[in-house]
Image (cartoon, rainbow, N blue to C red):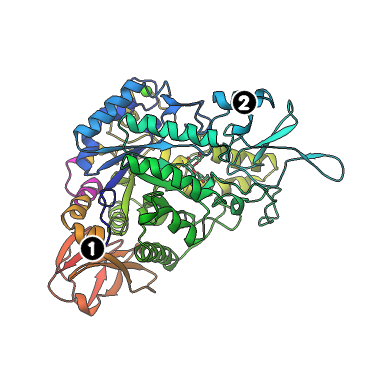
Amino acid sequence: PDHQAWWKESNVYQIYPASFKDSNGDGIGDIPGIVSELDYIADLGVDIVWLCPCYKSPQVDMGYDISDYKDIYEKYGTLSDIDNLISGLHKRGLKFVMDLVVNHTSDQHPWFQSAISSKDSEYRDWYIWKKPKYAADGTRQPPNNWSSHFGGSAWEYDANSDEYYLHLFAKEQPDLNWENPLVRDAVYDIMRFWLDRGVDGFRMDVINFISKDPAMPDAPITNPSTKYQKGAMYYAAGPRLHEYLQELGKILKEYDAFSVGEMPSVFDPAEIIKAVGFDRNELSMIFHFEIVSVDHGPTGKYTPRNWVLTELKKIVDKWQTFMQSNDGWNAIYLENHDQSRSVSRFASDEPKVRKVAAKMLATFLGFQSGTIFVYQGQELGLANVPKSWGIDKYRDIDSLNRYNEKVEAGASQEDLDSILAEMQKKARDNARTPMQWDTTDNAGFSTVAPWMDVNEDYKLWNAESQVNDPSSVYAYWQSLFRLRREFKNVLVYGKFALVDALNESVIAYKRVYGSTEALVVTSFKDSEVTWTVPKEYVKPGKILLTNYDRSDISGEIVLRPFEAFVLLVQ
Ligand code: TEU
Ligand code: CA
C-alpha cells in the first residue's frame, strides 16, 4: 500500500511578509500584521503556513539575501513576534514552515564580510573564489562564462585579492561553499535553532544548487546573443548534492519536519527521485519549474512563447505518473512570489469570466495528487498588475535588471514596450502587490502608501467581499480543502490518470482508489466547448464541486467558458 504521511494530507498557504499586512503604518507588511489575520488563514482550511524570508537582511532581493539567520528583519518585527506567530498558528492546529536560504548569504553577512576582508580570513573558504582568466588581448575575464540568474556574469571581481567570487543570483548574494564542512555545520545549526523554536519545517531555496562541479567549466553557448551562458548543468544537480541532502534529511527526520525543496533546472528524473523517494530520507517534495516555464520564450522569460494546452497536460501527466510509480510525492503549485498570477497567466482575468476562471484553475490544481500550495491572494483570484503600469511601478531586482540591460544596450522604444508587455505577463512583481483586504484606502493593507502600489482592481477584488460570499473564489477554495479531507483516500492517495489526453480545450483526469473514482473536468476555453463524457462515467454519480450549476453528465455535454466540475462515482 502507499505510504501515508501527514505532510501528504496537508495544504499549504504561502505568505510574502512585505505584502501581506502592515500593522504599524510604515507601508511594509510585518509579522504582527500576519498574526492579526490568522483566523482568515485558518478559515480557508489550510494546514501549513510557509513564510518567505523574514530574517535580517539588506533586502537587495526581498530577504533572499540574509545577513543574520537567527534574527528578524527590523521592519518585519522581532523574534518574539515570530514566537507569537508560531504559537498563534499552533493554537489553531496549523503548522509553520520557514524559508531556508542557504545556497548563498547576503554580502553583508559577517561570514562574507570577513571572507572578503582578506585571503587569510578563517571564513575565506566559506565562499567560492577563483583567479581571473585573461583573454588573448590581456583583458581580465571572469573564471568562466556562467550567467547570473538576475543577468550579467555570475562572478564578481574583488580587486583587493585579485580573485572573483561566485554569485548565481545578485552580486550581493555570494554562494556558500558547501564543500567546506564548517559551512554545512553552520547550516545544520541554523536548522536546529529554528526547529527547536517550534518551526515545523522548511521550504529550501534553490536547494539543488548547493553542490557545484568543482572544475566549474564554461557552459555551452545556448544563447549567442549574450556574453554569459546558463551554467545550470554544472550546478543544478552537482556531484555531492545527495550527500548533502542526506545530511539535511537526518535533521529533518529527527524532528519529523516538513520539507519542500525548490529545484529549478533539473531535468534528470533519476536526480529528482533520489531527492524525494519516500525511503531516501532527503526531502518530502520539490518544486519543479516545467509548468511555470511553459510561456518562457527561447531566449528567456521576457520573450514571448505561445503554448498549447496539451503541453501543459503532458507536464502534469509526466509528474503525476512519475511520482506515483516511483514512490515520490508532488508539490502542486501555479503561483508563488516568483510567478505571475495564474488567473491572468493560464486562464483569463477578463471581468466577465475572471471568477469562473479562477475557480477552474483551483479545480485543475486542487484535485491532483500532491501537497497543494496556494499563494496569498490566489484564494481570491487576484490578477496581474494593470497593463498601464510603467517600469517606474516595478520593484523587483530581476525585472529592473533585465529592463535596464535593454536600456543600456540602446534598445528602441518598441523593444522596451515589448519587454514591458512580457513583464506584465510574467514578472515577479505581479505576485508582490499588497494583499487586497477591503475597499478602504490602500486596500486595507496599510494606512499609508505601501512600498509597492496596490493593484487598481482592489475595490472589486478583496478579502472582505469574499469571505462571507458562498459563491466567491475564497469559498470555492474552502470547499476544495474540505473535500480533500473528506475524501482523503481518493483525493489524496488515489492514482492519477489523464482522460481525453489529446483534447486542446479541456484538461480532464481521474483519481482512482479501489472502486471509488473522481473525474475532474476543466475547460481552459473562454467560449463553449462540447465534450464527451467517457462511457464509464455516464452513471449515477455525485457532483462534488463545480463553478457553474451542473447536474447533467450524460454523453455529450456543452462546457461553458472555463467550466469545471468534479464527479464522484463509487
Ligand atoms: O528563486 C530561484 C529561481 O531560480 C527563480 O525562480 C528566480 O526567481 C528566477 O530565476 C528569476 O527570474 C529563489 C527564490 O524563490 C527567489 O525569490 C530568489 O530571488 C532566488 O531564489 C534567490 O534566492
Ligand atoms: Ca509595517
Q: Is residue 468 magenta?
A: yes
Q: Residue at x 70, y 53 (%)?
A: 225
Of label 1 and label 2, which has the lower sequence position?
2
Q: Quadrant of ligand 2?
A: top left
Residue type at the position of mark 1? Phe
Is 557 located above or below residue 466 in the figure?
below
Mark 2 residue element:
loop
Is 446 located above or below residue 564 in the figure?
above
Where residue 416 sits: x, y (%)? 61, 45
Residue 330 appearing in the image: no
Task: Give the residues drawn in magenta, as a range.
Answer: 467-479
Residue type at the position of mark 2? Glu
Q: Circle 1 is placed at which residue position? A: 565
Q: Residues within 10 Å of mark 1 (few under 14, many from 20)?
A: many
Is 225 located above or below residue 25 in the figure?
below
Residue furthest to the left in view is 540
Query: Foreground: 37 or 132?
Result: 132
Where residue 385 sits: x, y (%)? 43, 42
Q: Is residue 440 magenta?
A: no
Separation (CA) of disc 1 from disc 2? 61 Å
Q: How many marks?
A: 2
Q: Which mark is residue 122?
A: 2
Pick the quarter of the image with the C terminus: bottom left
Where residue 147 sits: x, y (%)? 64, 45
